[in-house]
Image: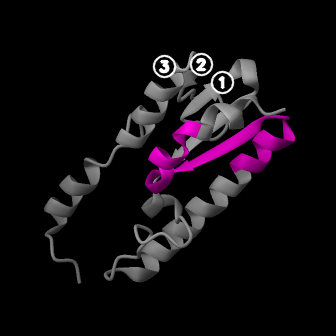
Amino acid sequence: MDTLTQEKRSDVMSRIRSKDTKPEMLVRRHLHAMGFRFRLHSSKLPGHPDIVLPKWHTVIFVNGCFWHRHEGCKAASTPKSNVEYWNGKFERNVARDRQEHAAWEAAGWRVIVLWECEVKKRLEFLPELIQKR
């Protein structure tokens, strides 16, 4: 049973952003400071990657642990109410992620996935991941 009214739950969910999240902004600032130039959220590209580095043939997805089900992460918990709905939603998200990443890799692009909980730890290694050939 949800502890919030339907209107309040709708209000809370409407405030969850898919673009310009704090972890994503942190990655973008870091990349820009390191001299990388990139494109953002191109709706013409499959999967709408958060960051596209065309020169390096690399796409970066900054995934939220909850929505994209980061294995072993405490933030990837399942809500106690409406469990069947949430499990289905999470399964669809993970399947879609796999398909999009496979499509990018099949097209010859490098796919980097940064998890929300690990962004700060992995920023220093990001240039190496991008430039690796």
Amino acid of disc 1: Leu
Q: Are marks 2 and 3 in contact (CB under 8 Å)?
A: no
Q: Are marks 3 and 1 in contact (CB under 8 Å)?
A: no
Residue type, mark 2 in image:
Phe
| Dot in front, 3 or 1 | 3
Is 80 placed left or right of 74 in the picture?
A: left
Would you identify the image quadrant in which residue 117 lies? bottom left
Task: Quickly name the residue at label 1.
Answer: 53
Magenta segment: 100-124
3D distance between C-alphas at marks 2 and 1: 8 Å
Q: Nearer the viewer, mark 2 or mark 3?
A: 3
Kind of element beneath mark 3 = helix
Crowd class of label 3 (few under 14; some 14 to 19; many from 20; radius 10 Å): few
Q: Which residue is mark 2?
A: 36
Q: Residue at x 55, y 20 (%)?
A: 34
Between the C-alphas of marks 3 and 1, the distance is 14 Å
How many marks overall? 3
Mark 2 or mark 1: name the one nearer the start of the chain: 2
Horizontally, is 13 left or right of 98 in the view? left
Q: Which residue is mark 3?
A: 33
Q: State the residue at coordinates (22%, 77%).
A: 2
Q: Are marks 2 and 1 in contact (CB under 8 Å)?
A: yes
- On the image, the x and y values in percent for residue 53 come to 66, 24
In which quadrant of the rendered view does residue 74 lie?
A: bottom left
Which image quadrant for residue 79? bottom left
